[in-house]
Image: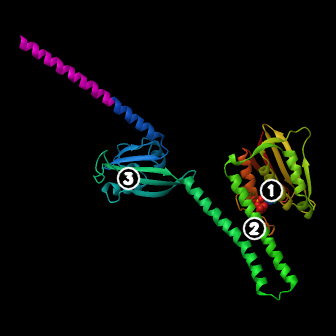
Amino acid sequence: MADRTGTWWRRRAAVREHVAQVATLEQQVARLERRGQDLERILRGLGEGVLAVDRAGIVVHANRAAIELLGLDAAGGLGSHMFVVVPDSDVCELLEDVMRGEEPVQSKEVVVERPHGEQVLVINIRPLRAAGSEVDAEPEGAIAVVRDVTELRRLERARRDFFGNVSHELKTPIAAIRGAVETILDDPEMAIDVRVRFLDGARRHTRRLEALVSDLLALARYEGSPRELERTSVDLSVLAREVISASDDLAAGGSVRLEVDQPKGIAAVVRGDEEALRQALSNLVSNAIAHSGEGGVVRIVLERGEGALTVSVVDQGEGIPAEAIERIFERFYRVDTARSRGRGSTGIGLSIVKHVMQAHGGRVEVDSELGRGSTFRLVLPV
Ligand code: ADP
């Protein structure tokens, strides 16, 4: 009897232990599932694409970014062989190399054609090893991390182009100044009028250098963060009149008339950086004067619209060819390069205008007709 009771108690204890073990296991499974879901969420939220394959080349994971960047089908090809689902076979070969242990890490940059243009991807491939395994243990698979570097490459190219352009623009006046100085030094007997001519040329090129450097400094300032602006209340009607009177000499040279047109009662006060706005307006006015013919009129027109103040600079000059309109706000772009350079233009003026407006949360617009004139509009939020 006592024996049977003992067995019953032992069995009961064993069942209880078993139930407790099952409960712990269930908790562990739930914890693992939660962890798996967390990991899934993290991978889904990543901007980088993550594609994992096992040793046989079967896709075991592909997050949303990998599906988009590598052009996998919507399900990510889970359970299929990578050669079937990854369109770029080079990527599969790199994954295989890494798994074979031939290369510990592989990196590749690929350019892919997309409907909206080219996309540049950097793909980094590493072996996949179990946690805690030796570094040189045979990989259980491989993982590819894909990053979209299209914007980065575009910025790098823009930076290279910028330095190329700056060096080119600086070289021309420097060579001219050096040429003039050396010619004078080489010929002590040079007639005074010839010497004056050379010195005059050197002075012209020095001014060109000055204009270029000050435009570059302005560009560096306004292209940076809008936080660098010193904002105060600026009355644009006062600013317009100041710019007009400062440009009078320039206009008189080409006998161009300057006017400000402001309907009565229009409040023209905005929050902004006075110096930056002065520079933007003054660049537009000097362009309008430079491209106006003898007897032309340049008008600054102030208008109030829905939540914005518009300052237009209107000329009746030569206008801009339709195919150039899109490019005139680019740095160093000039419509008629040889003629503009002769005028001492740098090709940076409109680029400064664009950045000043962007820094103020506004924009610059242009309408132009060849032979009839141009209208540049500064639209500022109020
Ligand atoms: P630039 O220093 O050459 O004036 P901008 O960036 O100010 O440089 O202007 C770029 C080009 O746009 C100029 O070379 C010129 O050909 C054209 N442009 C700008 N404003 C006018 C205008 N009001 N009328 C005609 N062409 C203009």
Mark 1 and mark 3: span between their CA atoms?
A: 54 Å
Which residues make up the magenta segment?
1-29
- Specify whether residue 336 is in view: no
Instruction: Give whichever of discs 1 and 3 has the lower sequence position.
Output: 3
Q: Which residue is mark 3?
A: 126
Q: Is residue 36 above or below residue 9?
A: below
Locate residue 142 relative to residue 377 in the image: left or right. Answer: left
* Quadrant housing the C terminus: top right
The amino acid at mark 2 is Leu
Whether the residue under disc 1 has CB within 8 Å of ligand 1 = yes
Mark 2 and mark 3: span between their CA atoms?
A: 52 Å
Q: Decide whether residue 298 is among the magenta residues.
A: no
Q: Please give the label number shown on residue 263.
A: none
Q: Are marks 2 and 3 in contact (CB under 8 Å)?
A: no
Locate residue 279 relative to residue 84 in the image: left or right. Answer: right
Q: Quadrant of ligand 1?
A: bottom right
Q: Which residue is mark 2?
A: 209
Q: Nearer the viewer, mark 1 or mark 2?
A: 2
Q: Quadrant of residue 160?
A: bottom right
